[in-house]
Image: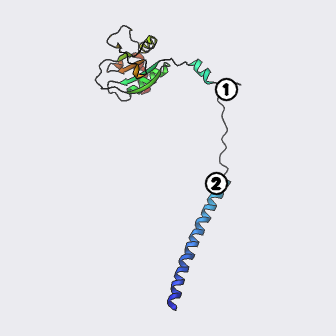
Amino acid sequence: MPKNKNKTNGLEVALNSGIAVSGVILLGFLYSFSQNQLHDGIEIEPSILNTSKHPILAKDIYIQNPVENIKVEVLNGCGVSALALKTTEFLRTKNIDVINSDNADNHDYKNTLIIQRNENIKSLKKIVESFGVYLGDSTRIKIIPDESLGVDVTIIIGKDYTSFAELNNYISAEN
């Protein structure tokens, strides 16, 4: 009989130890919960940016900075890191909607190409004006219609991108 009593005592000790450990963990959770509930923290005062009586509407922002109805894609054709992104940001400062910014089919473009993709000549004029290019510059301006692209103008940035003063100044200021 003494053998059964030893087995029972060992099992009781293990169970009592498990209950004690569980109790300590439970007390830890209760303490943590009570500290979180009692903690006042620092009160943050709300800040109101618009001090006028009327809220600023999206329409008002658009009237102040209208976006041209020109859809443009910018492609990096010279391999300079993040050049398409920086050119996209530059054009957006001119309120031009850039809907695609990516790499060109290769990085061997010597000259920047501005390609008119549809009959919207107004869009071509706005882009040419943004780059400071003469509208009759046939080395940079091409008319290759492709309605399937869903853009008015495709810009492939070539290795001559530093020759565009305003773009170059924008890129230099970003760095």
Q: Is residue 64 left or right of residue 114?
A: right
Report the residue that reaches farthest toward the left: 108
Task: Please say whether residue 115 is visible from this viewpoint.
Answer: yes
Whether residue 57 is situated above or below residue 22 in the rendered picture: above
Characterize the local packing of mark 2: few (<14), some (14-19) or many (20 or more) Cα atoms within 10 angstroms: few
- Residue at (59%, 68%) from the top-left corner? 24
Q: Quadrant of residue 99?
A: top left
Image coloring type: rainbow
Q: Secondary structure at mark 2?
A: helix
Camera-side residue of 152 and 104: 152
- Residue at (59%, 18%) from the top-left corner? 63
Q: Quadrant of the C terminus?
A: top left
Q: Secondary structure at mark 1?
A: loop
x%, y% of residue 139?
Answer: 31, 12
Q: Is residue 168 left or right of residue 21?
A: left
Residue type, numbered disc 1: Pro
x%, y% of residue 8?
Answer: 54, 83
To which residue does mark 2 refer? 36
Q: Nearer the viewer, mark 2 or mark 1?
A: 1
Camera-side residue of 172 and 79: 79
Q: Which mark is residue 55?
A: 1
x%, y% of residue 7?
Answer: 51, 84
Task: Please say whether residue 172 is visible from this viewpoint.
Answer: no
